[in-house]
Amino acid sequence: VIVSRRWLEALLGRPLDAAQAAELLTMRCCPVDGVVPRHRDLGEVRVGRVLEVRRHPNADRLSLCLVDAGSDAPVEVVCGASNVTAGKVYPYAPVGATLPGGLTLERRKIRGTVSNGMLCSAKELGLGADQDGILELSTDAAPGTPLLDAVPLADDQILLEVYANRPDLLGHKGVARELAAALGGAVKLPDVGTGKGGHGGTFHLPTFQRSPAGEGVVDGVAVRLEDPEGAPRYMIAVLRGVRVGPSPAWLAARLEAIGQRPINNVVDATNYVLFELSQPLHAFDLAKLRGPAVVVRRGRPGEKIVTLDGVERTLTGDMTAICDAERPTIVAGVMGSAESEVTAATTAVVLECACFQPTRIRRTRRSLGLASESSYRYERGIDVLGMPDAMRRTIELIVAVAGGEVREPPLDLWPEPAQPRSVFLRPARVAHLLGVPVPRDEIERLLASVGFVAAPRGADDRLGVQVPGWRPDVVREVDLIEEVARLRGYDTFPDELRPYRPTTVADAPREVTAARLREHLVRAGLFEARTLPLGPEDGPDALPLVNPLSAEERHLRRRLLPGLVRRSEHNWSARTRDIRLFEVGNVFRRGTDAPEEYLAVAAVLSGSRHPPHWSDGGAVPDMDIWDLKHHFEATLALAWPGARVRPAKAGGWEAVGAGGDPVGWAGPLEADRPVWAAPLLGFETRVADGPRPAPRYRPLPTTPPVERDVALVVPEAVAAAEVERVLTDALGPLLERLAVFDQYRGPAVPAGTRSLAWHLTFRAPDRTLREKEVDERLMTALTSLRPLGVRQRES
Amino acid sequence: MRDLLASLDGLRERLREIPQADERRLQDLRTELLGRRAGALTEILKQLPTLDADARRSVGGAANALKRDVEEALDARDRELKRGAGATTGLDLSLPGRARWHGGLHPVTQVVDEICGIFHELGFTRAVGPEIESERNNFDALNFPKDHPALDAQDSFYVGRELLLRTHTSPVQIRTLEAYPPPIRVVIPGQVYRRDPFDASHAPVFEQIEGLVVDEGISFVDLKATLSRFARRFFTPETAVRFHPSFFPFTEPSADMSVQCQICRGSGCATCKQTGWIEILGSGMVHPAVLENCGVDSERYTGFAFGMGPARIAILRHGVPDIRLFYDSDMRFLAQLADGGAGGVP
């Protein structure tokens, strides 16, 4: 929301420093996004008095003016405007000044005569369209005075970020109220004739016609409130004899200062009150009203209205419509129809001041995709108790700027009048929640400074507080405590650390495991990636979004690997060849009854096994599936303790948990790979819940080992793991460890076989093994391999 | 005899090999020269008794002198190698060393870990919750009114009836309050989702850290003290901190915390929009309605909660111009920002 410093000054009756006001508002109400000075680019323009006007010797249309610009001697300026008159005062831009369009004035000859600067038009100063030549100023300021000091152009826009709970700050009066509470003084509404001064809020319009029946007639217009749920309070005034035309300068300037375009005096008057009191008002043309009647009812499904922006809208039964005797003329609280708009031809105006139900307006705005200053305020809640003042103020303003009169008191339909809300506050609770005691007098003073009214003290310690109508957010004690805290200033509270009791919540095991996985993979030389969990459907049980943002991102990921493959392709596109990425994150499945969510870890590998070193002679081997298998197994040990890795039917390896269910996979990946890139390998596994058991101690051996190497000829069809299983069974507990250290294929072994060599370590925990004993056992074990077609290789 | 003296001269030549030998070669040389069975010098010494007296004297003298020299050289080289210095003799030590691949945590994870670590010192443990949440936990129990403008900033992705991707980590407040009795002191890191298009300053998915403290007697002073302490630990002990009013449906009073801009030190710059302050987190006293919704006695217990965006902090800390860089997973970017001085080499 934009507020104008000058407007605030008019309400406060005192000058303000915009930066200081911004700071006060930030520290007491709501953040300020910035302060934007207006017309700062006119800083070099001065007030100039034309002393004498002569005909230019060489041009009929030009005149030669002698201008007093405050310096010792008058300067000669060539001027092309016909309205230049001796004795009058105009904006004067001296040589060297830069104008808003970016033009820097130089001393130059015009038709043979030197011009020392320029007398400016409104357009040249960025102050609107050219009317008749140069801009005539009405000021008593001495020649040479900076223009910005002489005329009320300079202003600052203060950009407020108003939270949804503070609709009162959407009007200048509410912001001024907060500043008055901080700076002292009172808020007075400026005079409607001039925008200056203040009359303290007394209105000449006396009364309203109250009608509990929900209908009535005002100056020949029949008004019926059929939807009191949608419009709890509804007021109509009729003004006749208005002359629609441009607004006076002060009113137009007020609106322009906050970035609003002036339209005409009647509409501008309603907008002025909207931005002053935060009460939306709507003026429409009585002549366009069939009946003439105003009916407030729910929309009828399929009913059409062309709104002010020229778009045809279709209403539904969930919306409130303001209708004449036949059809809708306003989408209640959002926008009026183009047809009923106030135009230059309008002489009689129907003026609506209403309270609409916030959620109704919110739904209407969302379903029509149509937001306005009015809907913004109605959604947040307006001051239903302040409506009569807003109505009076608007009528007064219209009469002042457009003429006309109100012949009958306005109608006020309010079937269920609301009373001001009262909330109790215990001073002890203030101290309890804020951590320091705040004296009762101070509490009362702080609350009163922004319009809360404390009831006289009763028997108990409680404070009865009446909440002003513009504060719909204050409904219970804690809301008043917040008022006390912010009005006192958050920085008045100490920040000393006080003793605390330990938490009952243990670190989440999931977080502990995720942290250990990350640490492990970083140590293994991988970088952590974060990929978007949204993407294309990556499997039949992918979980779709109900309301996706784009066609490409319609599903939640069911695996991490596809995202990492895309990231690898991104790295290749940057010509990075060595890729080592991992991610720890949640994956999702559609599930049978409800969506499912698991923690998973995945990694991709491609390129050199280690960084190049000169000793390698320029040839570093690329990572292959054996590097992958190791990373997979090492990660599984943390992610899913006890999982077994076995070759997968579809290629690569799969990991299975204790129950035989697959939990992970590793293997080569398909990717859009440039020719120079190395193959892409990857793995992914789910992460088991629950704590990891601590490793158990086993006594360290004290006896010496016996080591043997054995080379076996193994048929291609027999897996190394199978050979190991048979050997392990046959060798019994004396076998401490076995490890493949070589594989050979070639002419030295029969076709269809290969040679595999194992290094075996034997040990007895309680005695020194004899070599003979080991050799005998080994011979026996080798015979048990015969059924597999495995025999010892002869050297 | 002349043959033997010539052999000794030949053997003496081999003394030169000793200072260059590595450990293995040294062992071989010792065996070759002095080996008990077939050492070259041993062989010569074995022949001494077969020589005449003169020859025995001259050959014996030379052989024993050589033996002494060889032993000394071997021992010297052995000591050198054991000191570890010998391996560098004769090498071009200006050549680069042999590296291993190193990895690194994502810059956002680094910030999360650092923040959670500081709160750990202040007695907080880590809690987590699912990313798919109920409307009830994400909004209703947190005191969001239905159909209220407060929901505008929380445009959400739905995945089912009243099921959505959480828009903040605050639903874990509800889960924690329902599962554990006070005293509660937890921080809750996690990914959250907003239905925002992906651009330089918005991501549809981003990391958040929530905090919750509930116990008897917790006040606004505790909020200020804990969060100021955090800010001064995370930034510098001199960092100025200030609190100002804010609004969240689930806290009352609500307060945003700003810290002095770390770039201009408060004098005003583009990063802090000339204000000298950077907003770091939102916080507030837990709204009594939230406690009541979770079955906690709001008269007896009070608390405070806070939330912040580690990605935003990482952006400020590293001067990253576009949030999308955090999701590109470019190896060069990750290596630049890796903890522990990877120095930009992936």
Image: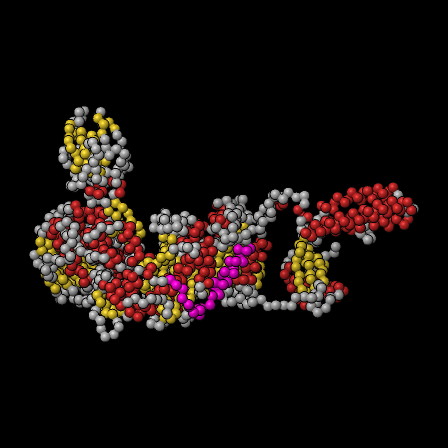
Tell me residue A784's x, y (percent): 70, 65
Question: Is residue B101 toward the left or the right of residue A91 in the image?
Answer: right
Nearest the eye: A359 or B301: B301
Question: Is residue A469 toward the left or the right of residue B21 in the image?
Answer: left
Number of disc labels: 0
Give me the residue at 26% from left, 50% from top.
A17
Nearest the eye: A114 or B176: A114
Give me the residue at 18% from left, 63% from top.
A385
Decide: is B72 above or below A234: above
Nearest the eye: B300 or B142: B300
Tell me residue A671's x, y (percent): 50, 50
Decide: is A554 above or below B290: above
Instruction: Kindly tell me whether residue A398 is visible in this rendering.
Output: yes
Give me the residue at 65% from left, 56% from top.
A716
Residue bounds of the magenta highlight: A495-524
Report the colour scheme.
secondary structure
Question: Does A332 lie within the magenta span?
Answer: no
Q: Residue furthest bottom?
A: A459
Decide: is A276 above or below A423: above
Tell me residue B346's x, y (percent): 52, 48
Question: Is residue B31 toward the left or the right of residue A357 in the image?
Answer: right
Quadrant, the C terminus of chain A: bottom right
In which quadrant of the rendered view does residue B173 lie?
Answer: bottom left
Instruction: Kindly tell me whether residue A360 is visible in this rendering.
Output: no
Give me the residue at 58% from left, 61% from top.
A646
Nearest the eye: A303 or B94: B94
Q: Residue furthest right?
A: B52
Question: Does A515 lie within the magenta span?
Answer: yes
In which quadrant of the rendered view does residue A590 lie?
Answer: bottom left
Tell me residue A379's x, y (percent): 25, 59
Q: Residue furthest left?
A: A407
